[in-house]
Image (spheres, rainbow, N blue to C red):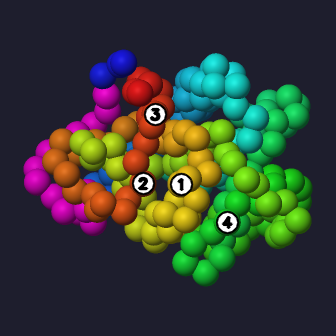
C-alpha cells in the first residue's frame, strides 16, 4: 500500500470551505502539466482494470478540472468492455450505456442519449471523480450529492469504487458525512492507494 500524497488543508475547515479550497487548487494544477498527469492516472487505471478482470465499468464524462478519461474510454471500447456513464435524473442519476452521440447537458456535463433498454445488474468497477477526500476515504465532490444518492441505492451492485483526481486534496480531519461514498482505491498521478 502506497502512502497518500497530495496537498493537505492548512487549517481546520468545514466541508464547504474545504471544497472551495480544493477547487481552487484543482483549477491551478489543471493548467500546467494536465496532459502528463492525466496520462499517469489513465495508465494506473488501465492496469487496475486489467488486473481486476473488470468487464462492466462505470466511468464519467469529464469536466475541465477532472481527469480526462476519453483516451481510456476509446481503449476500453476497442476491447469490447461494457462502459456505463451517469445520466442525470432530478437530484441523482442512473447509469446508461456509453454510446454516441454525446450531448452537453446540465452543469456542462456531456451525456449519451437516454437508453432505458440497458439495465445493468452489477458493475465491476465504478470510477468516480473527486474534488477531495478526508481521512475516512470519503468523497468530497461538487456539492450536489448526485453520486451519494446514486451509490446509496446501488452500492450492493458495485464491486469496487475507485476515486480519481489530478492531484489529491486531502483532509487529515473528518469533514465528510456518513452518507458520503467511500473509496476502495484512490488513483492520482502521484500514487495509488488501496
Q: Residue at x 62, y 51 (%)?
A: 157
What residue is disc 3 on? 185
The label on residue 94 is: 4
Task: Say above or below: 193 vs 102.
Answer: above
Query: x and y percent of residue 170 in the render?
Result: 28, 42
The label on residue 87 is: none
Query: Badge 2: few (under 14), some or many (20 or more) residues near its Cα, within 10 Å?
Result: many
Main secondary structure type of the part rendered in magenta: loop
What residue is disc 1 on? 155
Look at the image and give the residue range highlighted in magenta: 4-18
Q: Earlier in the sequence, mark 4 or mark 1?
A: 4
Query: x and y percent of residue 167 in the render?
Result: 41, 36
2 and 4 marks in contact (CB < 8 Å): no
Element type at marker 1?
helix
4 and 3 marks in contact (CB < 8 Å): no
Quote the CA–CA distance across marks 2 and 1. 9 Å
Quote the CA–CA distance across marks 2 and 3. 12 Å
Quote the CA–CA distance across marks 4 and 1. 12 Å
Q: Earlier in the sequence, mark 1 or mark 3?
A: 1
Task: Say above or below: 87 vs 83.
Answer: below
Q: Residue at x 40, y 27 (%)?
A: 193
Element type at marker 3?
strand
Task: Say above or below: 140 vs 48.
Answer: below
Q: As rendered, which of 130 and 65 lies closer to the eye?
A: 130
Query: x and y percent of residue 181 in the render?
Result: 42, 54
What residue is disc 2 on? 181
Amino acid at each position: 500500500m502506497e502512502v497518500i500524497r497530495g496537498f493537505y488543508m492548512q487549517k481546520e475547515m468545514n466541508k464547504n470551505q474545504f471544497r472551495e479550497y480544493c477547487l481552487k487548487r484543482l483549477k491551478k494544477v489543471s493548467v500546467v502539466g494536465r496532459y502528463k498527469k492525466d496520462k499517469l492516472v489513465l495508465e494506473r487505471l488501465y492496469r487496475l482494470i486489467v488486473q481486476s478482470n473488470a468487464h462492466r465499468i462505470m466511468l464519467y464524462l469529464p469536466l475541465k478540472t477532472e481527469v480526462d478519461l476519453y483516451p481510456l474510454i476509446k481503449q476500453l471500447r476497442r476491447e469490447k468492455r461494457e462502459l456505463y456513464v451517469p445520466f442525470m435524473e432530478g437530484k441523482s442519476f442512473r447509469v446508461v450505456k456509453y454510446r454516441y452521440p454525446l450531448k452537453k447537458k446540465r452543469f456542462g456535463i456531456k451525456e449519451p442519449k437516454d437508453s432505458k433498454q440497458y439495465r445493468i445488474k452489477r458493475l465491476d468497477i465504478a470510477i468516480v471523480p473527486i474534488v477531495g477526500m478526508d481521512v475516512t476515504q470519503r468523497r468530497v465532490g461538487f456539492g450536489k450529492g448526485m453520486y451519494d444518492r446514486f451509490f446509496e441505492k446501488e452500492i450492493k451492485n458495485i464491486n469496487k469504487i475507485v476515486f480519481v483526481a489530478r492531484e489529491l486534496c486531502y483532509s487529515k480531519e473528518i469533514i465528510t458525512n456518513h452518507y458520503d461514498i467511500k473509496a476502495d482505491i484512490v488513483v492520482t498521478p502521484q500514487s495509488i492507494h488501496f
